[in-house]
Image (tube, rainbow, N blue to C red):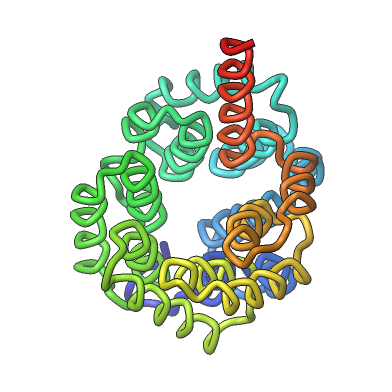
C-alpha cells in the first residue's frame, strides 16, 4: 500500500483489477514515478490479471528466480492453476514458504495461500493464513471464505472491519455485495445497486454483469438476468461463472441449458456446478441400479 501522505499511484490500476477489467488493468499499467515497492505491487497486479485471463504460461515464463517474493507467490498461483496434475508439489512448495519465518508472513504469500486453499475447499487451512488480515485484499478474501463456509455472521464482522478502514473502498463495496447476496431477502436489492453503481463508474465486465444477473435471479427477474449473462458471454465465452449462471438461468426461463453446461464441463471440469451435477448423476445411476 502507498503511504497516506503521498498520492496513490496504483489506485486506478487496483480498481480495474478488483472489478474484473483485467485487460484494461494490463493496458494501463505503465505508470511513471513508482517507488520500488509500488513497482512490485504493480507487477503483481498485472500478473494476477494475466492469471485471471487464463494466461498462466505467460506468468510462469515472465517471473524468474530473481523476482521479488510477492511475484514468486503469484507465479506459484499460475503453476497451481495451469497444471492440476502437479498441484501437490505446488502446494508443498507453498507450505515451505509459509513455514519460512523470513517470508511466510508476507501479505501476498498469505493472499495466494488463502486463494489456493480456498480452491482446494480447505477453508480452515486458508483462514490460518488470511485471518489476521493486514490488507484490504486479505479482508475481502476472508469474507469470501466465510461465505463459502456458510458463516455469514463471521463474514459480516470482517466486512465491518473493512468498512471501518474505508467504507468507500471498491473491495468494501464488493464484499458488501457478496454478503448481501449470501444473506438474501431485502439485501438483494442493495447488492444490485452496488453492481449498478460499478457499471456506471467502470468498464462493463463479466464480474459486474454476473453480479447484476445473480441479483436479478434472486429477485425472480430471470429475463433481465439472461440478457445480462448473454452480454457477459459476448465479453468472455469461457468465463466459468457466466456459463454456470446461464445454466441456472436457462432452466428458469424454460430453455435448454445443455450447451452452456457442456461448455462449462469442457473448459472448467473442476467447477463446483460440474462436480455437483456429476455427483447427482452418480447418485441417480446408483438409485436406478438398486431398483434393477
Q: Whole-percent x and y of residue 151?
A: 25, 44
Identify which residue, 156 or 11, lies in the foreground: 156
Q: Is residue 98 above or below residue 273?
A: above
Residue drawn at the location 34% of the way across and 57% of the way down: 182
Q: Is residue 234 above or below residue 269?
A: below
Would residue 157 be found to the left or right of residue 13 on screen?
Answer: left
Q: Whole-percent x and y of residue 198?
A: 49, 80
Q: Residue furthest bottom?
A: 200
Q: Is residue 237 above or below residue 150?
A: below
Residue drawn at the location 33% of the way across and 77% of the way down: 190
Would residue 175 be found to the left or right of residue 230 on screen?
Answer: left
Q: Whole-percent x and y of residue 270?
A: 65, 34
Q: Quadrant of the C terminus?
A: top right
Q: Looking at the image, can residue 26 be seen? A: yes
Identify which residue, 57 or 182, lies in the foreground: 182
Residue drawn at the location 52% of the way across and 65% of the way down: 18
Residue 13 sits in which quadrant? bottom right
Residue 140 sits in which quadrant? bottom left
* Figure disc tally: 0
Q: Looking at the image, can residue 45 be seen? A: no
Identify which residue, 259 or 81, lies in the foreground: 259
Residue drawn at the location 47% of the way across and 34% of the way down: 113
Would residue 79 be found to the left or right of residue 57 on screen?
Answer: left
Identify which residue, 179 or 282, lies in the foreground: 282
Q: Is residue 122 above or below residue 263?
A: above
Residue 1 sits in which quadrant? bottom left
Q: Whole-percent x and y of residue 63?
A: 72, 41
Amino acid at each position: 500500500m502507498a503511504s497516506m501522505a503521498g498520492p496513490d499511484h496504483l489506485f486506478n490500476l487496483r480498481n480495474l483489477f478488483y472489478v474484473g477489467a483485467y485487460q484494461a488493468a494490463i493496458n494501463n499499467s505503465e505508470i511513471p514515478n513508482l517507488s520500488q515497492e509500488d513497482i512490485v505491487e504493480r507487477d503483481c497486479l498485472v500478473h494476477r490479471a494475466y492469471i485471471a485471463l487464463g494466461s498462466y504460461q505467460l506468468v510462469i515464463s515472465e517471473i524468474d528466480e530473481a523476482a521479488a517474493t510477492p511475484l514468486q507467490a503469484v507465479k506459484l498461483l499460475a503453476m497451481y492453476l495451469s497444471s492440476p496434475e502437479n498441484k501437490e508439489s505446488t502446494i508443498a512448495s507453498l507450505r515451505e514458504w509459509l513455514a519460512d519465518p523470513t517470508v511466510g508472513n508476507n501479505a501476498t504469500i498469505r493472499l495466494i495461500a488463502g486463494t489456493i486453499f480456498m480452491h482446494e475447499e480447505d477453508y480452515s487451512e486458508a483462514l490460518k493464513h488470511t485471518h489476521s488480515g493486514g490488507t484490504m485484499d486479505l479482508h475481502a478474501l476472508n469474507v469470501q471464505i466465510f461465505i463459502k463456509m456458510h458463516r455469514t455472521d463471521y463474514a459480516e464482522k470482517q466486512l465491518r472491519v473493512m468498512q471501518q478502514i474505508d467504507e468507500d473502498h471498491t473491495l468494501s463495496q464488493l464484499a458488501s455485495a457478496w454478503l448481501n447476496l449470501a444473506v438474501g431477502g431485502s439485501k438483494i436489492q442493495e447488492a444490485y445497486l452496488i453492481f449498478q453503481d460499478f457499471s456506471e463508474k467502470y468498464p462493463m465486465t463479466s464480474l459486474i454483469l454476473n453480479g447484476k444477473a445473480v441479483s436479478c435471479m434472486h429477485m425472480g427477474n430471470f429475463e433481465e438476468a439472461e440478457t445480462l449473462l448473454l452480454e457477459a458471454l459476448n465479453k468472455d465465452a469461457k468465463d466459468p461463472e457466466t456459463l454456470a449462471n446461464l445454466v441456472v438461468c436457462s432452466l428458469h426461463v424454460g430453455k435448454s441449458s445443455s450447451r452452456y453446461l457442456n461448455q462449462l464441463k469442457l473448459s472448467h471440469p473442476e467447477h463446483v456446478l460440474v462436480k455437483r451435477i456429476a455427483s447427482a448423476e452418480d447418485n441417480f445411476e446408483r438409485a436406478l441400479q438398486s431398483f434393477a
